[in-house]
Image (cartoon, rainbow, N blue to C red):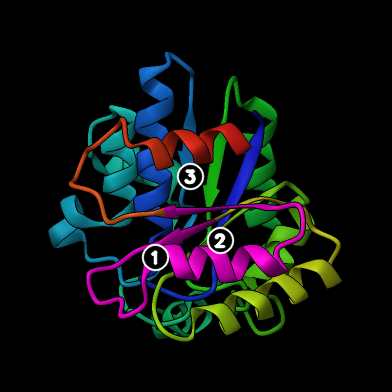
Amino acid sequence: MAAYFVTSTGTDIGKTFVTAALIRYLRESNQPVAALKPVVSGYDSSVVDTSDPAVLLDALGRPVTADEVNQIAPWRFRAPLSPDLAAAREGRHIDFDELVKFSRAAIDGAKGPLFIEGLGGIMVPLDGQRTVLDWMSALDIPLLLVVGGYLGTISHTLTALDVIAQRKLSIAAIVVSESERDTVELADTVASITRFAGSVGVVGLPRLPAGIKHHPAVAKIASLL
């Protein structure tokens, strides 16, 4: 294992859920795993314990403090908008070069598997010119593509795969993250995406109870990394 960028076809699909599940699984194997969520929008410091950085810190076994949050998520914005718009509301902006530098420093210093979690989908704007896709391209590390199980996800997933292929980025695995609202059987969605995914492994991950470490799907995802 090395460093992986966790990305998705949209927001609220399950990137943090999948990343936290993998962290717990790897920690159970005594691997020195690390994770970052460098950019966060919709961050409310008054309810930090339910934020994505807090979920990752909890999975890592680290305390949820202001300093710890700042270490893994230095670019935080309150408005639940794309980061370019959320930053503008606060009179701020994301320095793309600094974001890439921060990410690369973590990659270079990692002593085990490192997960860098993006936000929203692959084309979410970071500033007036760059998107999450540009961030991923600058790092050029394997991707963990998390997609939903909802009706329409197959088209969204295949669109993402085409865009990723145009940038010549590699995908370590595709995870279909089930939600309680899905109207399509998880196995059917996995089978459909698999037919178009070439050699990339596709794993269906059911909606699991919080904190679970030993589900076979999590082990299967880890085996593809």
Q: Which residue is mark 3?
A: 36
Q: Position of residue 208 (x, y in %)?
A: 24, 49
The answer to whether marks 3 and 1 mark residues whose Cβ atoms lie closer than 8 Å is no
Q: Position of residue 82 (x, y in %)?
A: 47, 80
Mark 2–mark 3 Cα distance, whole angstroms, equals 12 Å
- Label 2 SS: strand
N-term-proximal mark, 2 vs 1: 2
Q: Would you call the spot at circle 2 few (<14 residues within 10 Å), some (14-19), or many (20 or more)?
A: many
Q: Look at discs 3 and 1 and give the one toward the viewer.
A: 1
The amino acid pointed to by label 2 is Thr
Q: Quadrant of residue 98?
A: bottom right
Q: Which residue is mark 2?
A: 7
Q: Quadrant of residue 207?
A: bottom left
Mark 3–mark 1 Cα distance, whole angstroms, equals 28 Å
203 falls in the magenta region: yes
Q: Would you call the spot at circle 3 few (<14 residues within 10 Å), some (14-19), or many (20 or more)?
A: many
The amino acid pointed to by label 1 is Leu
Asked if residue 124 can be seen in this view, the reply is: no
Toward the viewer: 177 or 115? 177
Residue in the picture at 66% in, 85% down = 128
Q: Which residue is mark 1?
A: 186
Residue in the picture at 23% in, 39% down = 65
N-term-proximal mark, 2 vs 3: 2
Q: From which residue to which does the magenta span run?
A: 175-204
- Label 3 SS: strand
Height in image: 128 above or below 187? below
The amino acid pointed to by label 3 is Leu
N-term-proximal mark, 3 vs 1: 3
